[in-house]
Image (cartoon, rainbow, N blue to C red):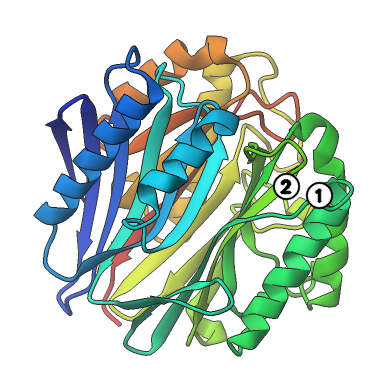
Amino acid sequence: MKYTHQTYQAVRAELSTFETADGAGEYHVMLHVTDGTLPFQSQLTALLDAYATLRKSLPAGTQPLFERYFLSDAANQAEPLLAATAEISQCALSLVQQPPLDGTKIALWALLQRGVETRLLPNGLFEAKRGNYRQLWLGGSYNRAANSEYQMRLLFNDYALQLMQEGCTLADNCLRTWIFVQNVDCNYAGVVKARNQVFATQNLTEKTHFIASTGIGGRHADPSVLVMLDAYAVEGLRPEQIQQLYARTHLNPTYEYGVSFERGTAIDFGTYRQILISGTASINNKGEVVHAGDIRKQTFRMWENVEALLKEAGSGYEDVTHLIVYLRDVADYQVVRDLFAERFPDIPTVITLAPVCRPGWLIEMECSALKKQEN
C-alpha cells in the first residue's frame, strides 16, 4: 500500500493507493478540515474544492464509488451538503452525524476505483462493473417506521428486494453493512432483534454465515430516523472466493452473545485479496469487555484483535487502506489521537464521536485492506 499526504487550503488530505499489474486501482481518501473556526459553509467549500483538486491528480478513468461525510450537526448541515454535492457526487452517498473529534464540522471518506463502469440503477443501488464482477453499493438508506426494530426490519427487507431485482441475495452477495443507530444505548436492542429475525429468513445463520458489519451510534438529520443502512455487495463471486474470519484465539463467534455479524471477510479477486474488518472493540474470546474503563489498554487490545483478523487473511496493517475510529467519550480523543499518530502515522484515519453498542466499550475501529496475490 502506498500512502501520501497532501495539504490544500484549510484541508489536509490522506490518500492510500493500491494498484495491480492488470490495471486495477483503488484509492481511499480521507479529507480533514484544518481550521475549525470557519463556519460550516466555508469548511464545506474548502473540503469539496480540495476533493475536486485531488481527484484531478488521480489516474484517468478513476471514479468515486462511495462517499461518506461525517457531520457534527446533521440537522443543520445535511441540507446544504446535499445541495452542494447534488451534481458532483455521482456515487453511493452516506451522510451521518458522527462529529469529527479534531474540532471541525465535517470530514470525508471516499473510495474510488480505476477502470470501472459505473451507473445509478433504477432501484437506487450504485453499480460499478469491472471484468466479471459487479459491485452494488447502497448509501444512506432510511425510513420512518415506529421504532428501531421496525426500521431495521424494513431496511433489510427493502435491501433484500433491491438485491433480488439484480439477481442477488443477502446471503450470496452482500459482503459488508454499516448500521448507524440514533441513541445506540436505547435503540440497538431493536436493531439486533430485527436483524436476527430477517437473517434467519435469508439463510444467514450460525450454521451458514453472517455479514461483516459495523453497528454504531450515528444519526440522521431527521430525529424520527432511528436507523440508517449502508451496504456493499458483489455479483460474480463463487463461494470458494469468500473466507469468513474468526481469530478464535482472540474473539468469539458473535452469535454466542446474541448478535449476527461476521468479525471479518476476505474476498479473492484473482490478482488481489480484499479484507473487510468489522467494527472491532476490546473484547476477548468469551465475548467479554476487556480493560473496562481504561482507554489506553482498550486501544491496545482492539489493535491486537484487528491484527489477528488481518493475519488470518494473510495480511497485516501494512495492507490497510483506511481506519475509522469511534469513541464514546470526547475526553478520550487526545489520548487516542496520539496513540494512532504514533503507530499509524501514514494510514488515512478519521476519529469520530460515536458510542459503541455496549457501554463498556470506550473505543471501536474498522478498516479494510488490499493485498496483491498470484491467482
Residue at the spot x=32%, y=40% of the render?
Answer: 30
Quarter holding the C terminus? bottom left
> Of the numbered discs in the image, which one, if any, rests on residue 227?
2
Mark 2 surroundings within 10 Å by alpha-carbon count, few (fewer than 14), some (14 through 19), many (20 or more): many
Nearest the camera: 23 or 240? 23
20 displayed left or right of 74: left
The quadrant where residue 291 appears: top right
Q: Are marks 2 and 1 in contact (CB under 8 Å)?
A: yes
Mark 2 → mark 1, Cα distance in angstroms: 8 Å
Mark 1 surroundings within 10 Å by alpha-carbon count, few (fewer than 14), some (14 through 19), many (20 or more): many
Residue at the spot x=33%, y=50% of the render?
Answer: 321
Q: Which residue is mark 1?
A: 191
Residue 169 in the image, given as x and y percentages of width and height: 66, 81
Q: State which mark lies toward you, 2 or 1.
A: 2
> Of the numbered discs in the image, which one, if any, rests on residue 344?
none
Q: Could you tell me if residue 257 is visible in this image?
A: no
Residue 299 in the image, given as x and y percentages of width and height: 52, 25
Please tell me whether mark 2 sits on a helix, a strand or a loop. strand
Total number of numbered discs in the rendering:
2
140 displayed left or right of 31: right
Residue 329 in the image, given as x and y percentages of width and height: 61, 16
Residue 127 in the image, given as x and y percentages of width and height: 44, 76
The amino acid type, in three-letter code, at marker 2 is Val
The quadrant where residue 222 appears: top right
Please tell me whether mark 1 sits on a helix, a strand or a loop. helix
372 displayed left or right of 103: left
Residue at the spot x=23%, y=73% of the render?
Answer: 24
